[in-house]
Image (cartoon, coloured by chain):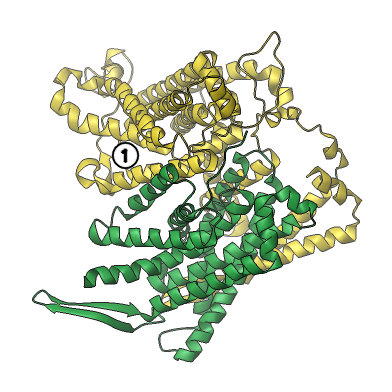
Amino acid sequence: MEYFLQQLINGVTLGSIYGLIAIGYTLVYGIIGMINFAHGDIFMIGAFIALIVIVALGLSAVTGFGLLILALILVLVIAMVFAGVYSWTLERVAYRPLRGSFRLAPLISAIGMSITLQEYARISQDARPKPLQPIVSGGFKVAERINEAGSFVVSLSYIQIIIVATTLILMTIFTLLITHTSLGRAQRACEQDMKMASLLGIDVDRTISITFVMGAALAAVAGLMFLLYYGVIDFYIGFLAGVKAFTAAVLGGIGSLPGAMLGGLVIGLIEVFWSAYFSVEYKDVAAFSMLAMVLIFLPQGILGKPEVEKV
Amino acid sequence: MAATAAAHAGKDMGAILKDCALAGLLGLAIFAPIIGLKTASAPGGLILEQRWGTVFIAAGIVFAGRLALHLLFWSRVDRAKVKAGAPSRLAAKLEPLIPFIGVTMLLAAVILPWLPSTDRYILDLGILVLTYVMLGWGLNIVVGLAGLLDLGYVAFYAVGAYSYALLSTRYFPMWMPEFLMPWAFWICLPVAGLLAACWGVVLGFPVLRLRGDYLAIVTLAFGEIIRVILQNWYTFTGGPNGISGIPRPSFFGIEFTREENGFASVFGLDYTSMHRIIFLYYVILLLALITNFVTMRLRRLPIGRAWEALREDEIACRSLGINTVSTKLTAFAIGAMFAGFAGSFFATRQGFVSPESFVFMESALVLAIVVLGGLGSQIGVVIAAVVMIGGFEMFRNLDFLKNIFGNDFDPGQIRMLIFGLAMVLIMIWRPRGLMTRRDPTIFLKEKKAVSGDLVAEGQG
């Protein structure tokens, strides 16, 4: 039972990270109906920028708690801004000229951009994994079991609390942004009918750009969380995390913000429990099979609307 | 794009410079953190190395590139005049030449091993290019003809390679009489193709209902699943170490060895290791030509016409009573079969297979060849394969760049970066690929030229 509880905590943490990335997929797919294949690599770039800022600020475990929180918020903001700039440029350079082009073109351009970003990070930061000393350590002891086999402590680390709390706060902010502001209204209008929205005076290009920036900002948050949680990143983390987050977005129902979060949690839990109870080597197979099964049996997702086929 | 071109043409120099300066500043902001500050390992954690010079050079390149685009490209008013939907100029010019180009290329490919300037390096490169041509043609059936975007094509390549590797090293010595062993390659080749085709059906069946992007992402997932399994199933596939000691192919039973009954002695030649390379070259040339021939013939059969119809409009196909399930499955299976042949050839040529050869990047490369060549165009695939694989090799030989960028600069390092950028740029410049014509294979009375841009793409 204690083991289960521990895995549940880990799964929710991992699921929060996936959920944050998934929002980027779901927003973009909702509006322009393309898989932003390079989104996982924006997450990777965000993680790298966070790492660079952390090293530049000289943060370490000995930094005082109050100062540390302030510094992490600063890191978060810088990473979000830069990832936003990357994503804005990405949309401008690789996707906007292809809007209205034939169906495969944006996807192939996105694959090309994904390769470009990966190689860019690999060449400029080299291919070695980048380890980061733990900055936030310690945590609570939730439960403990002592028997003849030894003791097993269920712990809830501060970093896990930070991850889940940040995710909840950002989710609330972004949901409010989409449901209650004129920007969100414009986004939803574009999602329903881009041509009609532009006829009614919505700057569609600008709305799409902002959508990309929003998704990238959340991916950068996920990048920082990933960095703090695992303590090591490399140029290739974006591919796997991207595919899993996309699975989460589809599972939750593409286009739906709470769906992305829910999907992220489900994928995170599946991955953690699969690793814990079956085999670590095949955890990616579990996630990929999940993707295939969801798309085949539940293509509209848990919270999504079924797509109607029109002639 | 046409509208922006006209708008740019009217702008004065000041506005252009301002725009370029903004682009340069954006470049500065983008490159500053990642290029400017490099994390390096040091005792006690990471440190940052500063490289601001490179950042300014990169931003300068962005500025200059934007300026060049303004002055040379966007200012040309006549771009707006190109009639939308007409076949591209390049394709229109090349169109009457296509049979001629095809024959020339075939002749060049056949005589290549006999040219005096051909050495082992060129032949190895030729074998590599032909392997990709074959993979490209195979994938062209799935993507170009049937309109099903497959991002996991490398999985079938892997199935073919591992089938041959496992059969020839592990199972044939157990099952087969000794005298058949030199024939292992020729027996395994169809078996590997068959197994790959079976996998094509197995993986194709569940995804039939999916369309477009979803199909792409699921095939990607399948490709990765197969790779992860190959990597972790130690007892069967050897895990990350792969399988080594795969037997080399023989000349229909005669081994390429120095011995008495080897190829050289039997034909009264002096022994050189080139014999085997030349033989391998012709094997892959033959396999590739078979792929092409089968594809061309299939296009004239009802099934080929059904593929093309499916690509254009799936709903219309169903209304006309075409069985979309079996049509899609045959496309998957036949495409996979050719990948299996190519994989089998790959295994015997390398003598060694490991999961590392079957990563997603390979799928992306083959897809890029098909797409850049022009979906559905056989000759386009050849041109794209020669350009891309040949271009990759050229980066190895660009040593003069070291004189410009210093000795630390390794041109081989940036080739994937260039590859990624090229994919994006070609999509922007010519989304339908270099050869954009899509001729209908069947026509009524006269053949009408239809550009790919005019035809709605299949929603498969």
In the image, taking residue A196 as reference, residue A301 lies left or right, namely: left
Helix, strand or loop under label 1: strand
Q: Position of residue B127 (x, y in %)?
A: 45, 29
Asked whether B140 or A53 is in front, the reply is B140
In the image, taking residue B202 as reference, residue B294 lies left or right, namely: right
Q: Quadrant of the C terminus of chain A?
A: top right
Against B450, residue A277 (above or below) is below
Chain of the residue that carries numbered disc 1 in the rendered image: B
Quarter where residue B172 is shown: top left
Q: Residue at x 54, y 58 (%)?
A: A256
Total labels drawn: 1
Residue pointed to by mark 1 = B353
- Chain A shade: green
Residue at the far top in the pictured view: B445
Q: Amino acid at mark 1?
A: Val
Q: Residue at x 56, y 23 (%)?
A: B319
Asked whether B67 or B435 is in front, the reply is B435
Q: Position of residue A174 (x, y in %)?
A: 58, 69
Residue at the far left in the pictured view: A148
On the question of residue A228 being in view, the answer is yes
In the image, taking residue A197 as reference, residue A293 lies left or right, namely: left
Within 10 Å of disc 1 (Cα), the crowding (few <14, some 14-19, many 20+) is many
On the question of residue A48 being in view, the answer is no
- Chain B shade: yellow
Q: Residue at x 83, y 50 (%)?
A: B71
Asked whether A42 or A159 is in front, the reply is A159
Q: Position of residue B104 (x, y in %)?
A: 60, 18
